[in-house]
Amino acid sequence: MTMKSIIGLDHVVVMTKNLTEAAKRWQGLGFTIAPLGMHTAAIGTANHTIMLGPDYLELIGVVAETERNVASREFLAKRGEGIERAAFTSTDADAGVAELKARGFAALGPYDFGRAVDLPDGRQVEAKFRTFLWPVEERPGGLRIFACQHLTREHVWLHELTRHANTATRIDRVEMLSKDPVTAAAHMGRLIDRPVEKVGDGALKVLTGAGRGDFIFLDRAALERRHQGVSLAGMPDEGAVTIALRVADAGAAAKAVGPRAIVKGPGVVKVAPAEANGVILEFRAER
């Protein structure tokens, strides 16, 4: 039975070695970057968010070594920059923990935390969240997953932050590279109680629900076929590698990305991992 406490993909986390430089890089790709947000001392990280419609991207950097960011530091040491984890939207973190435990998973949390947000009118407020995590060893396709309950959505989805020069509107999919896509997809499906579907090019899809972004599992050969012209040098054998976004205007996306675009075609623009902190970035026009 599908988990009742999660309703779809919420956001994708890109770990960076230099958060300031990463923010400049993504701004240069046509994104509106939210001001720096400092997480609580126990977490020891800071972020810049890229707010979309129903979901968002999060650039994160470690500012102080703590027990809570050990896994993130290990990721950077082993793989380097890239997609380190993904979050689902939770309607009730307490219920989510109970659901996972009922399924035999040793859920972590719920954890309460927040970060300061500077509003356009000069006021400072606190964005508050409640999260829970699947066990760290449960990493489908090498990706850590957790769920986030937004207690103050009005302090996160600020209208002016959701407007981007590249016209990005939402996450369409996250592509997962794996030597064994069948096993990895089944693992993700089991963790979130979602079916696995086959797609046309031999890849496998796990929908997250509520019209949110999908997870696509595929091997290196399939990834190369999907992204011809994009260098895959430095891509891991296992892990999340692509963020595909829907845009309102592919022409505007191409203009915003400019010379950093490695592929431009009818309705699609692609950016190589070297230009997006280890992420293959795709902009595709809305259907």
Image: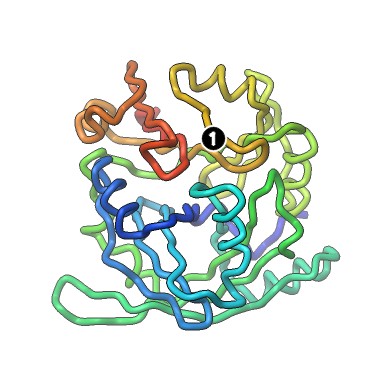
Query: Label 1's element?
Result: loop
Viewer-side residue, 22 vs 177: 22
Rendered position, 183 above or below 255: below
- Residue 287 in the image, given as x and y percentages of width and height: 40, 27
Left or right? Give the position of 17 relative to 145: left
Left or right? Give the position of 188 relative to 156: right
Residue at the right extreme?
104
Rendered position, 285 above or below 52: above
- Residue 144 in the image, given as x and y percentages of width and height: 64, 56
Which residue sits at x=34%, y=43%? Answer: 169
Instruction: Estimate how packed mark 1 is, as few (under 14), some (14 to 19) or many (20 or more) residues with alpha carbons within 10 Å.
Output: few
Give residue 69's quadrant in the image. bottom right
Which residue sits at x=19%, y=81%? Answer: 123
Display colour scheme: rainbow
Give residue 175's quadrant in the image. top right
Viewer-side residue, 69 vs 101: 69
Which residue sits at x=74%, y=40%? Answer: 184
Left or right? Give the position of 287 relative to 177: left
Where's the N terminus, which quadrant? bottom right
Which residue sits at x=56%, y=63%? Answer: 73
Name the residue carrying label 1.
234
Query: Is residue 60 something one can see in this rendering?
Result: yes
- Residue 68 in the image, given as x and y percentages of width and height: 59, 74
